[in-house]
């Protein structure tokens, strides 16, 4: 039976990265499908690896991004979050807790007239609002 571990090893080999314990651990954490920041990934990885710096995790993520394994999502005013690259999708961002959710939606073509002379590389849609959990909480300023 192919385990999750085998799948992670294969992913690393596919992009030509050496298989190391820390790389395996970080990728395995991201297979949860969550969007996690460097600190959260480091904390989770330390449970199994013991000592690990967030700088080391950041370096790993950088390699993963360069090889297309991992995707980064910027959150204004908060640390960026990382996820395994997979099916193309857009995001919803909670303005209260920073939670990020995947959204599958049609992306408009860049308007030719409005972007005269531009070469657009990608289009990103972010839905800003409040997540279900935050909506249940009274507002802090109330
Ligand atoms: Zn929230
Ligand atoms: Zn995502």
Image (spheres, grey):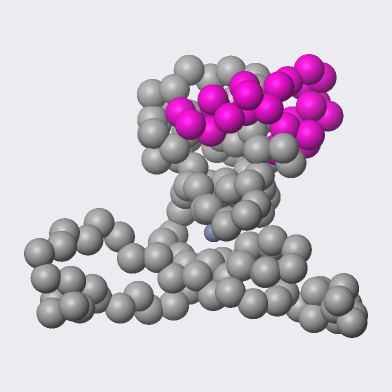
Report x, y in % for residue 30: 63, 44
Residue 11 in sight from this viewpoint: yes
In the image: residue 95, left or right of residue 63: right
56 in magenta: yes
In the image: residue 47, left or right of residue 9: right
Report x, y in % for residue 36: 66, 48
Residue situated in front as seen by the camera: 22 or 124:
124
Location of residue 89 (image quadrant): bottom left
Residue farthest toward the left in the current orientation of the protein: 117
82 in magenta: no
Locate the C terminus and report the quarter of the image it occupies.
bottom right
Q: Residue at x 48, y 17 (%)?
A: 18
Report x, y in % for residue 106: 37, 78
Locate the N terminus and report the quarter of the image it occupies.
top right
Q: Report the image quarter containing ligand 2.
A: bottom right
Q: Residue at x 46, y 53 (%)?
A: 86
Residue farthest toward the front in the current orientation of the protein: 141
In the image: residue 71, left or right of residue 101: left
Report x, y in % for residue 129: 64, 77
Task: Identify whether 116 is placed above or below 56.
Answer: below
Residue situated in front as seen by the camera: 85 or 6:
85
Residue 6 in sight from this viewpoint: no
Task: Identify whether 78 is placed above or below 3.
Answer: below
Residue situated in front as seen by the camera: 126 or 66:
126
Q: Residue at x 62, y 22 (%)?
A: 56
> How many marks do you count on the picture?
0
Prevailing secondary structure of the magenta residues: helix
Q: Which residues are magenta?
A: 41-63
Task: Identify whether 19 is placed above or below 117.
Answer: above
């Amino acid at each position: 039976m192919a385990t999750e571990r085998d799948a992670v090893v294969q992913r690393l080999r596919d992009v030509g990265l050496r298989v190391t314990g820390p790389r395996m651990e970080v990728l395995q954490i991201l297979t949860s499908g969550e969007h996690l920041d460097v600190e959260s990934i480091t904390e989770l990885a330390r449970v199994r690896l013991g000592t690990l710096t967030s700088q080391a995790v950041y370096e790993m993520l950088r390699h993963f991004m360069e090889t297309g394994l991992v995707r980064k999502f910027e959150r204004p005013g908060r640390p960026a979050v990382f996820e395994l690259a997979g099916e193309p999708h857009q995001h919803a961002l909670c303005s209260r807790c920073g939670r990020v959710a995947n959204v599958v939606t049609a992306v408009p073509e860049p308007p030719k007239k409005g972007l005269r002379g531009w070469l657009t590389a990608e289009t990103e849609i972010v839905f800003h609002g409040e997540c279900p959990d935050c909506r249940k909480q009274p507002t802090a300023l109330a």
